[in-house]
Image (spheres, rainbow, N blue to C red):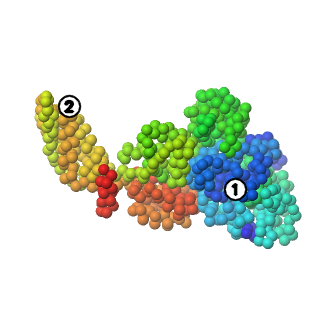
Amino acid sequence: MLCGAALAYVDRPRRAKSRKKGVAMPNAGNFHRVIALVGPQSSGKTALLEALLRQTGKLGARPQNGGRVFGDTSAEAKAREMGTEINVARTTFMGDTYSFIDCPGAIELMQESKNALAGVDAAVIVTESDTDKFVSLSPILHYLDEIKCPRYIFVNKVDKASGSVQKLVTDLSLAVKQKLALRHLPLRQDDQITGYADLASERVYTYQDDGPSTVTDLPQEDDDRMSQARYGLLETLADFDDHLMEELLEDVTPPKDEVYRDLAMEVQEGLIIPVMLGSALHQNGVHRLLKALRHEVPSVEKHIARLGATDRTEPVLGQVIKTIQTSHAGKLSLVRLLKGSVKDGDTINGERVSGVFHLHGDKYEKCALGEAGDLVGLGHLDSVVTGDTIVSGKGASDPLPKPDIAPPVFNVAVNVADRSDEVKLSQALRKIVDEDPAIAVVHAQDTNQTLLQGQGEIHLQITLDRLTNRYGMHITTEAPMIPYKETIRKGTSHHSRYKKQSGGHGQFGDVVVKIAPLPLGSGFNFEQTITGGAIPKQYIPSVEAGVREYLNRGPLGFQVVDVGVTLTDGSFHAVDSSDMAFKTAGRLAMSEAMPECHPVLLEPVMKVSVMVPSEHTAKINGLISSRRGQILGFDARQGWPGWDEVQAFLPQSEMQDMIIEIRSMTAGAGTYINEFDHLSELSGRLADQVLTSQQAAE
């Protein structure tokens, strides 16, 4: 269990920041706050959401079987026992309104979380005390830094934790850029955590199962630990407050209102991250978390300032953080309102709002008005998509910053079982992409496949399930085909004549072509050196068209590239020659000559950047080498302490399931980006396998 070892503090450079004395405590009631619950899968975010709702009287007692009663209600979430999209809960606490957004924990669904974080005032990072799992926090921590979002860390499941507070805080501090401020010192009895000391209020609490903790006295043997831990908290706050530093140096006990003021201001400015402990399942530490959120989470005005939108003059300003395709109400845009108010019938971004709703789980409660700071659903804004800025009138000319969409790392080819459903599939996919911008649908021209692209295997499985569950689509999938190409090693010259007689005019085309290999990456080049009118000029483009038509499928069965063709000679018939005849003659010349040019297979090679925690770099190097990759080098990942970026060339055929192995090696944290770089000759057994498969498919 977490023991009571005294905290060790690293001597860090202090950054003094003057503060005015007597600043009032922020957030004194009647506020709308929007707070995200983020963290790795299975860390207990949904359990914490339920605990917050129970503490605020919005949810009844926990069922005896311990099962979930709120959130994750979709068929996809139930089948996997995990969150697959954001879940919104609305409640009140001490006169203020709160919208909590439970974000999915799977790294493959992080785009959903990023979209939601664009509209929140603060985030609560839910994690377990297992330090081996802290690496999976890195992506979300880095994004919170990027958007400068105030945050807390709630260490969940302390009733099952092991290790010391010192190790916990030290290991967590390696994963963040800000200073950590431990708020709770756990107390134990008979190797069981029975409560905690709140280092800000200096009050001691005893845990009660399924209820608020009760105030108690500090055991005498914990006096020294309490004093050392509280002094550590004050030292952290004093790094940003000259006046508090002077008080500590002079052994003056600072008043509690000064401590609370510094906590609030330094949280809001992103200078510190408070660390709180508890067990959501047993309601432990949840009430104190609510109190901290009430007093320290910044107002919507601070959120506007963080977005750089303080000078915006629009009477209504907001941002869409989620698009929902409902079964009965149609399209619903979940909007964080930053300024003004919206009611049914108002014009937003040039469209008429059809209904204003508050969301609570899978319920949409119609309301008369959405106010500044509130999180509301606006009906039937058909042209609005996730991330869009909404304003009154025609639309925003200066959009608020929105999350970038991560490039896809996994894809499958999709087909409908019944070809008559192709139009229905297209419509369903448009709605899917509307809801989840991390999904992309592309038509691969080289292979004539429709590809569904996303952030991993689970991400696409969830999407396919949605197509079935929500839209009744029966989808078949297959692995994407690799767009192999072919080229030639030697050139030749060939004479071909197309002659056909039938009743009336016949067909006559006669050509001599010279075929030559070109350097890799040159593409196709067509020239002509006809002299003396051997072929009339009007027929020369037809010869080129016939040559190009053949190159779509060469002797090996793939598109031919890096070939030069020169039309050198030929003849024509004054009556029987035509564009069609010379096009056919050009195609015949290529089909007869190309097998003599030693055709070879080419495979696409991608330039890949793999981003992983540094301790896994060696594993990734081995993975790349085992997949016929060429490692170009690696360096520290810019802006990500403790991470590396490995650069490599990798055949596209080796990348289909690579993201699965990367994430398996890196506790789910690793990822990659890639782009096509060049074609490379493929020979030997692998080439034979490709050609055999191609012949079998014909």
Q: Amino acid at mark 2?
A: Gln
Q: CA distance from mark 1 to mark 2?
A: 78 Å
Relative depth, front residue between 667 and 258: 667
Residue that badge 1 annotates: 67
Nearest to the observer: residue 623 or residue 275: 623
Q: Which residue is mark 2?
A: 538
Query: In the image, is 535 to the left or to the right of 188?
Result: left
Residue 9 visible to the viewer: no
Q: Where is residue 60 shown, x and y percent of the image? A: 77, 50
Circle 1: element type: loop
**634 relative to 143, above or below:** below
> Which residue corresponds to the image point at 82% horizontal and 53% vertical from the top-left?
258
Query: Quadrant of residue 337 in the image?
Result: top right
User: Where on the picture, by quarter, is residue 648?
Assistant: bottom left
Residue 572, x across and y down, in percent? 13, 34
Amino acid identity at mark 1: Gly
Instruction: Determine whether, in the image, residue 508 is placed left or right of residue 356.
Output: left
